Image (cartoon, rainbow, N blue to C red):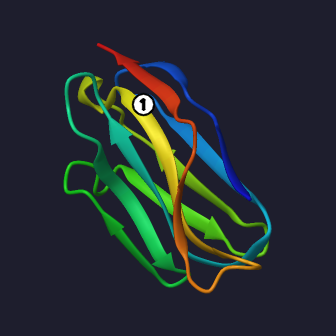
Amino acid sequence: QVHLVESGGGLVQSGGSLTLSCAASGSIFRINSMGWFRQAPGKQRELVAISPDADSTTYANTVKGRFTIARDNAKNTVSLQMNSLKPEDTAVYYCYAVIRTAFASGPSHYWGQGTQVTVSS
């Protein structure tokens, strides 16, 4: 069993900053990708940023230059530093990971419970 637990959401004014954190725990053999998705009301869940490995990252065009993803492989954590926040960044943010557990033959996809980020104008 694997759990992803997020923290750090909240309410912030436009132009402000927030940092989201996610910790993976359980019978983890290896973590492949870790990243963040978000879902705004009435919209589909979308990729925000993802780190397929320790040396590479991919960002949505809408957050490039404002958000920074960082992984700590030793601690099985991933964070998302969000700067220059805009009202359109308002959404539920989900931690995502592709993890192979100790007793599985291959990796599986896991999601956190989500954390609300609200940016006021």
| In this rendering, position of residue 46 left or right of residue 117 | left
Q: Residue drawn 33% across and 69% down?
A: 58
Measuring from the top left, give residue 18's x and y in whole percent.
Answer: 53, 35
Q: Secondary structure at mark 1?
A: strand
Q: Most extreme residue toward the top, as rendered?
A: 121
Q: Quadrant of residue 91?
A: top left
Check disc 1 and report the residue beneath it.
92
Q: In the picture shown, does residue 23 fall above or below 101?
A: above
Apparent side of residue 41 relative to residue 103 in the rendered image (left or right)? left
Which residue is at 57% across, 45% downward? 112
In this rendering, the count of numbered labels is 1
Q: Is residue 28 above or below residue 42?
A: below
Name the residue type under label 1: Val
Residue nearest the viewer, comparing 57 with 64:
57
From this view, report whether residue 75 is shown above or below residue 2: below
The crowding category of the residue bearing disc 1, from other C-alpha atoms within 10 Å (few below 14, some 14 to 19, many at least 20), is: some
At a point 61% along the width and 68% down the height, the residue shown is 71
- Left or right: 72 with respect to 121? right
Question: Residue 86 versus residue 36: which sits nearer the camera?
Answer: 36
Q: Could you tell me which residue is drawn at 36 percent across and 33 percent down?
A: 85
Q: Position of residue 121 (x, y in %)?
A: 29, 13
| Residue 4 position (above or below residue 86) | below
Q: Quadrant of residue 87?
A: top left
Q: Quadrant of the N terminus?
A: bottom right
